[in-house]
Amino acid sequence: MGLAAALSLEALMLKHLRKARTPSEARFALSLAPGLPLMAIASFVLLLVSGGDLSSWMSAWSLAWPRVTVITMVPVALLGMVSGRKLRAVRRLSVSGHLPDAELLTKLQVPVLKLSMILRTAFVVGILLLMTAKPELRESLEVIGALAILGSVCGLFFFKAQKEHQFWHFL
């Protein structure tokens, strides 16, 4: 639930960040979730530790889905680190005051943040499906692969829509 909340807060923050027309609006968007990185990291670690412990307790490591789940957490963590780094850079730019307003607002439009959020959400949905259905190896890989493809296609759609200046219009 913490990871879902972190992704939801990030989506809200990114939506407001994309709509920002002044540096003060950008700072407001970035202030919506000041503890987001800590919350996301803590939720992620808690999920790994508790899930690993539960899998050990249930002797589930011999099954395919827990192993595929742990492997799927790697891109979730890597994409989260990329997003965290980009958001820190955006925060520094918004408070530094070294850039003209127009240039600052252009730099705040970071499409990789939206793509990262979409892919992480797709992977988390896949992990939840694996935990619920408990499929064999082939099906587990198919679920994660299908959601990775779906997330990528959605991300490409959003990139194309951004070029047409309608990136957030549908939200």
Image (cartoon, rainbow, N blue to C red):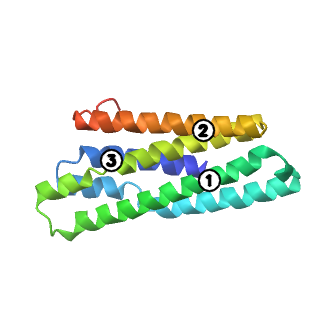
Disc 1 versus disc 2: distance between alpha carbons?
13 Å
- List the residue tagged with mark 1: 73
Front residue of this view, candidates 34 and 99? 99
What's the residue at 64%, 62% (across, down)? 45
Observer able to see residue 80: yes
Residue 135 in the image: above or below residue 110: above
Disc 3 versus disc 1: distance between alpha carbons?
22 Å
Where is residue 147 shown, x and y percent of the image? 57, 36
Residue type at mark 2 is: Gly
Viewer-side label of 2, 3: 2
Residue 18 lies in quadrant? top left
Where is residue 109 shown, x and y percent of the image? 26, 50
Q: Residues within 10 Å of mark 3 (few under 14, many from 20)?
A: some
Front residue of this view, candidates 20 and 137? 137
Where is residue 136 shown, x and y percent of the image? 79, 37
Task: Using residue 6 as the reference point, say whether residue 114 is left or right of it.
Answer: left
Where is residue 66 shown, x and y percent of the image? 75, 49
Observer able to see residue 168: no
Label 3–label 1 contact, CB within 8 A = no
Mark earlier in primary sequence (2, 3): 3
Identify the secondary structure beneath mark 3: helix
Task: Using residue 88 as the reference point, say whether residue 56 is left or right of it.
Answer: right
- List the residue tagged with mark 2: 145
Disc 2 versus disc 3: distance between alpha carbons?
23 Å
Identify the secondary structure beneath mark 2: helix
Mark earlier in primary sequence (3, 1): 1
Identify the secondary structure beneath mark 1: helix
> Which circle marks residue 111 in the picture?
3
